Image (cartoon, rainbow, N blue to C red):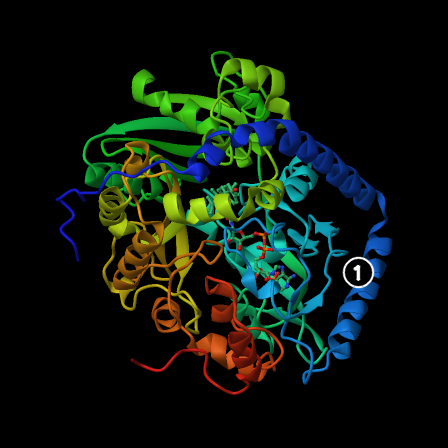
Amino acid sequence: MADLQTPLVRPKRKKVLVDYLVQFRWILVIFVVLPASALIYFNIYLGDMWSAMKSEKKRQKEHEDNVQKVVKRLKQRNPKKDGLVCTARKPWIAVGMRNVDYKRVRHFEVDLSAFRNILEIDAERMVAKVEPLVNMGQISRATCPMNLSLAVVAELDDLTVGGLINGYGIEGSSHIYGLFSDTVVALEIVLADGRVVRATKDNEYSDLFSGVPWSQGTLGFLVSAEIKLIPIKEYMRLTYTPVKGPLKEVAQAYADAVAPRDGDPAKVPDFVEGMVYSATEGVMMTGVYASKEEAKKKGNKINSVGWWFKPWFYQHAQTALKRGEFVEYIPTREYYHRHTRCLYWEGKLILPFGDQFWFRFLFGWLMPPKVSLLKATQGDAIRNYYHDNHVIQDMLVPLYKVGDALEFVHHEMEVYPLWLCPHRLFKLPVKTMIYPEPGFEHQQRQGDTSYAQMFTDVGVYYTPACIFRGEEFDGAESVKRLEQWLIENHSYQPQYAVTELNEKDFWRMFDASHYEHCRHKYGAVGTFMSVYYKSKKGRKSEKEVQEAEAAILEPAYADEA
Ligand SMILES: NC(=O)C1=CN([C@@H]2O[C@H](COP(=O)(O)OP(=O)(O)OC[C@H]3O[C@@H](n4cnc5c(N)ncnc54)[C@H](OP(=O)(O)O)[C@@H]3O)[C@@H](O)[C@H]2O)C=CC1
Ligand SMILES: C=C(/C=C/[C@@H](C)[C@H]1CC[C@H]2C3=CC=C4C[C@@H](O)CC[C@]4(C)[C@H]3CC[C@]12C)C(C)C
């Protein structure tokens, strides 16, 4: 590996047209994207209300009818002439960064757009039964007033249950509950042959149940999911702790926030996240649910971060570096969606003055722009700019390697702020696409238990410092090095991000064995696309499409070189 101490020497870069398109994108965003987003959000809100007003029985009946439509549509497919199967969701609607090129060539679409209802919130079983297009904003709006919540509420309102289960989802509670898919109790799936099955962790479809996460919809169609609920309180008591020192010390302070060194489980917070603002500064945040009685006690500070005029959350947290440690109470639902209004900090690049008081006060209620509309209006030039001159990547790394990961990112990309979010990776009876390091349980490292290894999502989103300095940056090469670092360090890259991996390296990062077992056992081969075919970057040629369609009984991983 390259010497991480020596800074990369980069040649100067000339500004080109697309730099100005990105710089002045705010004009399009203010006059078109924001108003259109507000209208769409309002429309979706009305749709959610309409859905909530239907009786449970009616929703269940509609669900059953819609499942039959999926079965019928699958049966209409002629394997000799139609392409491989995927959902009919438009590429630009999905939240991820991939170009979804497989939907731009021959394919066979199945429309799941009717599956947007919360079917049941069962406060006795503590389970919510929802359809795959139910999104995070919709579900937290329904459960929070009942003092209930999904155990892992992924941050952005538009993220869907289907995308989070077939991909990955994470939040500051994942150090307790694992990834979004770990909180699922049962999956209702339509298989390639039209069978509708209910898979749980211990029934006859338990292999399918554990195969679905990270499979990107390549084993079957998810038509509903039962997801674990937890009891919550009205407020989050949040402590902001500043840390100053080299990156390794910042990483250690973060690890101490996730898993207190004395190992006392009573000290493990309900929520943890870290923000790293520079090579020497970070703020760790630990949250504990609190009742409204506690929050409203004299002397306590309540901060309703959800109001449109409030400072952007990451900037508010940064004030701890000057103020020192402080504590405040945030209404729980507003806390869950704290990074939504400014799209973490990506909003700063899209609307450079969006964080100013005058803008927040006058227009903050229009935020955030819908990711789908940003994608629909970005054109190839801005999309490629984001691939070449920007970074939107996550690194899921073992907790004890966070310091190394931070140093790698600093040397390779110098992107700040960075997001740190812990998550458990459970040891399962089978080896799924992602799995803990073999033998981790004997090492007794901070945060690990006998049944799960503690990992961390290092979120790397923003423009690298060298671009701001007017130097060259090669996004694709940088991502390639990041991916190699991940493979060498038993770490993972979520598939919503753009990948440069070839097939062989893809299957070095992820384990193919259980996935392949499920693909064959459940007849997905020859009907559903393979996960690598879906993930691979770049426009697909007719030859690639034909090869994918012909790959009936071949293993997904490429030959050893
Ligand atoms: N906080 C967080 O956890 C965040 C997570 N993300 C990422 O965003 C993604 C979610 O975005 P979202 O727009 O909701 O999802 P997408 O529409 O992007 O779906 C993601 C994948 O899941 C498949 N999929 C979705 N629904 C179904 C279904 N019902 N049955 C079978 N397959 C399905 C899609 O298949 P197809 O290609 O056929 O449509 C696609 O391959 C997650 O995967 C996650 O990685 C992004 C930001 C934050
Ligand atoms: C993975 C997480 C969060 C990730 C977000 C920060 C990114 C997820 C999708 C990203 C975006 C999608 C498309 C875009 C259109 C472009 O024209 C501009 C950028 C962007 C809005 C981009 C911005 C970052 C994301 C929202 C969690 C786990 C923290």
Q: Quadrant of residue 137?
A: top right
Residue 529 at x, y = what percent?
57, 73
Relative horizontal placement of residue 148, taking residue 506 as reference (left or right): right
- The image shows residue 461, relative to residue 364, as above or below, that is below
Which residue is found at the position 25% from the left and 51% from the top?
Answer: 401
Q: Which quarter of the rendered picture does the C terminus lie within? A: bottom left
- The image shows residue 420, relative to residue 431, as above or below, that is above
Relative horizontal placement of residue 468, taking residue 431 as reference (left or right): left
- Closest to the observer: 16 or 73? 16
Mark 1: few, some, or many residues within 10 Å (few <14, many ≥20)? many
Residue 300 at x, y = what percent?
48, 16
- Closest to the observer: 386 or 282? 386
Residue ID for mark 1: 63
- Residue 66 visible in the current orientation: yes
Residue 166 at x, y = what percent?
56, 61
Q: Secondary structure at mark 1?
A: helix
- Residue 290 visible in the current orientation: no
Q: How many marks?
A: 1
The residue positioned farthest toward the bottom in the image shown: 553
What amino acid is at disc 1? His
Residue 285 at x, y = what percent?
39, 32
Q: Which quarter of the rendered picture does the N terminus lie within? A: bottom left
Q: Quadrant of residue 268?
A: top left
Which residue is found at the position 53% from the left and 21% from the top?
Answer: 295
